[in-house]
Image (tube, grey):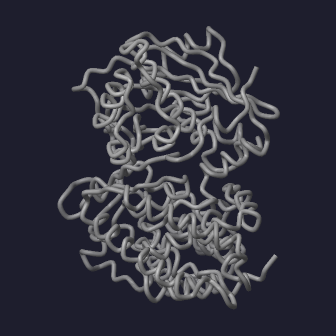
Amino acid sequence: MPETAGYRRPPEVVMRLARMGSFHQTRLSFMRSLLRRLKSENWRFRRQLWAVDQQGFGRAVYTVYGPERAYSLVAFAHDLPDDMRSDRVIATAWDATFTLFDGVPTESDLDRLESNVPRQEAGRISDSELSLSRANRSVRLWQHVIDCLSAGRQPALDRLEAVGYLLRTTAVYGSGKFGAADRLSICDRPELSGPFQAELLSVWLTRAFSIDLVEHIAKARGGEQAVAIEPELRRRIGVGNSTGLGMAPFLVNHPALLNNWMMAREEAFARVRSLARAETDAIGIFNRHFEGACFNLSQWHSEHPIQLAKLAALRADLENIAVYIERESLSGDHPWDRLYRWAEENLSLEGQEQLLSLMLEPYGGLVDELTQCMDADEHVSFFIDGSMTLSRLREIIDAQCNWALAVDYDQPENRARFWYTSAEKLEPRVGERFQESGAEYELPLAIGCDIKQLHAALLVWDGGPSVAEFLLAHPEHRHTTRRVQNLAARPYAEIQDNLIAADMLPIDILRCKLSFFGATKFDPRSDRWVRICMYQDAPFPHEWLEPAA
């Protein structure tokens, strides 16, 4: 294994919101690692049930069979009036609802699920279900595809590219929410030990359901003249997603997990940068993926001014990379490291992070094993070491928390916002401290401010020398002390920015997390929610897996 220490980017470079909000999917992303596992372990697939009427309403079951277990997506398609269709988390009805069932459901299971899954939060599911989700049709694309297929025509490529999906999920819940199986009950299963594998398996099967549903409706309307979607067009259809503030605090609330995600990504990048030579095959793979990135950019649309500026910068960056490659031909000593060092001086953050993704592509044999390091035992990181000396605690703050200490939190613009949980949907939200009420319900997500307050308290402490003695007198600093101690072993555990600043963009946090999922085509709708596409260009279950008997 190559020595990588000198090539790994430090946390103070990586853990800034502007960069994290420029991340792209990589071959370490959870969707891609899931599909590689299903293929390498020879999983099998079967559409277990299709009980959908000619209008497209009913239920279906899609099952994948692994070496030890089977998992089934149970899907329900509903008759939803147009005026009830909403991406808001407060919606109460959807075009389709889903659960991922542990095993193969019986008829009685399906009846129970049909009484609960369509109600989502208002219903209840059991620990036989691993996820709960819902989706709405794309208003821009759904009817166009059905009209074309029922008339014997293929849908227009430009319209497929402009949207990218037929169904758009508005929530995919797991890890015990609303009665689903708790994470601890399934995390020892190899196929589900990685982050969000059950939820992303559900989304992959949902994509297959969306295609089957429009083809079914088209066939019912068009009869013998109706056609199926051609394979190349089919691949261009993914699953959409609308993600808002509810997801944003996750990375703050799971510092050990965030550290492991980032460490794996940065170690993979460092391994590639450390290579002394680029083989011809690797250069060829890089070039193919570079062409794919250029094509993806041509199909990546947004109307949000922040994203428009990023897309313009990325367009210029890809042109500059093409010029560099032609001039340098990726030959000579340490070509990948030289390419990235050039990128740091010449490309935007968007371009630098796109380049990282591209540089990993030729080296699956070198980096894919790192996906095994991306889960975390968060109970271990929860304990506070009361025997640690306060001098050691201060050393960690001084060495790793300059980003927190440098901010003047007395300035209104540096504490302009606060995070809270909404009473209506129990979802995280962001309030404006000086314009809105509710700051008394503030969540402990202002980590930088808390670290500075801890540091100030330590400077005037005149009691005993241990953390335990200090916290007995000042229990209000327990959660911050835990986070600081965590940094000693987990340097990538904290977002190194002020999360209550006036110019903080929650969409940067959302994009970082979604890039690890494997999302593409980030399209912010405001600074607080974003639309994405998942599994676009990925294989479908019937293509990727052998049929089950």
Residue 333 point in image, percent of width and height: 69, 91
Residue 420 relative to residue 376: left or right:
left
Residue 403 point in image, percent of width and height: 46, 82
Residue 358 point in image, percent of width and height: 57, 68
Residue 409 relative to residue 176: left or right:
left
Q: Is residue 255 above or below residue 346?
A: above
Nearest to the observer: residue 400 or residue 42: 42
Nearest to the observer: residue 39 or residue 330: 330
Quarter of the view holding residue 540: top right
Nearest to the observer: residue 159 or residue 275: 159
Quarter of the view holding residue 395: bottom right
Q: Is residue 248 above or below residue 153?
A: below
Residue 102 point in image, percent of width and height: 68, 27
Q: Is residue 125 above or below residue 483?
A: above
The answer to whether residue 472 shows anywhere in this view is: no
Quarter of the view holding residue 336: bottom right
